[in-house]
Image (cartoon, grey):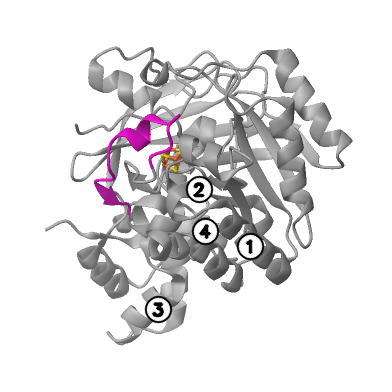
Amino acid sequence: MNKESVYGRKLEDLAAWLAERGHKKSRTLKVWDYLYRNRTADFQEMTDAHPEAVRLLAEQYTTTTMTEHTRQESSDGTVKFLFRLADGNLIETVLMRHPFGLSVCVTTQVGCNIGCSFCASGLLAKSRDLSAGEIVEQVMQVQFYLDRAGQGERVTHIVVMGIGEPFDNYANVMDFLRVVLDPKGLAIGPRHITVSTSGLAGKIREFADSGLNVNLAVSLHAPNDELRTRVMKINKAIPIAQVMDAMDYFLERTNRRITVEYILLRDVNDRLEHARELAELIGRMKRPMVNVNLIPYNPVDEHSQYQRSEPETVRAFFDALKKSGIRCSTRVEHGADIDAACGQLRSKQISGGGRRTSDGPASGGRHGELSDADQCRRSARQANE
Ligand code: SF4
């Protein structure tokens, strides 16, 4: 039987588990230090921790539930990892470098049930949720990679924007967040973490009430129900009005600005009338504290019905939003020289068309901006079809 990942357990859970076996909290804290401060992945190397407590933990838990299958390193410092899970499934994780720090984009599910029409992950149903430990371990694996490079670099930001709908795996994602937020552990600040959802309204409300104060991004991608249902079939079940109400609720509860993701598809949702409609939609919010993130679509084979908007169209859309008083930005791609869009690396490995991989540390080079939630997510193909 596979052991449970120790990274999926919160400090208080581990302390309670060890307390039931007669060990004081200070012993758990020592192990916690080893796990997250020293980043020791081998229980045998926790030599200053209480030996019996370590023995019990090693018997019950593991620090390794995945192995690195493939790694691609971009000249802009972006690194894409393909990990093989214990059950053979492959998942992707991406490290991105920014002027403000290093962020990791994590995957939360194997496949996805949301079925966005521009995303290959949505072509096949979710085969399973990732456990909290498997999500935390993606961050740890990237941190181990940085540690091996010996430059003293630390993961400072996390974006929950990889393959899967995080709120369709809500309990595990919440446990994951509590572990990485722990000030005695990785201590990633809530303002340095963003969770991106396709708009599961009920879960947005629950998230607002959670008190975690983590950033929220919502994928809208269209300004009206007809168009949004065409682009994202989830809109049939949860129409725009419900999403906007939930966003209002989130703002009321947290006072935190929301990022609205909008992928621009040529001649589908990128016209000026759509920009104006989007501005009106946002303008009707109780407190329109949002930043619209415009994402030029990156064409992939699986979705040839969509094309990338022309640069002048993107500019006009951007200007129209600005003119209407909407905060917005456009996103620049990361890792242009590797399989940048989420799922591409996995897809190519499965089909035998993998590109270069490297065993060395990431090479330095120019820095781009973070490839966004949906750039990062889209075009994934099920690894295990
Ligand atoms: S874009 Fe995200 S939510 Fe939509 S199908 Fe792809 S992975 Fe799922």
Q: CA distance from mark 4 to mark 2?
A: 23 Å
Give the CA separation, mark 3 to mark 4: 17 Å
* Residue occupying image coordinates x 40% and y 18%: 358
Task: Measure how far apart labels 1 and 2 are at the Cα level.
Answer: 14 Å
**Amino acid identity at mark 4:** Val
Q: Which mark is residue 245?
A: 1
Tell me, for residue 15, which label it has, or none.
Answer: 3
Looking at the rendered image, the disc whose residue lies closer to the viewer, 3 or 4, is 4
Q: Give coordinates of residue 195: x percent, y percent.
A: 55, 52
Left of 133 or right of it: where is 384? left
Q: What is the C-alpha distance between the residues marked 1 and 3?
A: 40 Å
What amino acid type is highlighted by mark number 2? Ser
Q: Earlier in the sequence, mark 3 or mark 2?
A: 3
Side (left or right) of 270 relative to 283: left
Q: Counting other residues with Cα less than 10 Å from the Cα at mark 2, is it few (<14), some (14-19), or many (20 or more)?
A: many
Kindly check if marks 3 and 2 are in contact, taking CB atoms under 8 A apart as contact.
Answer: no
Magenta-highlighted residues: 115-130
- In which quadrant is the N terminus drawn? bottom left
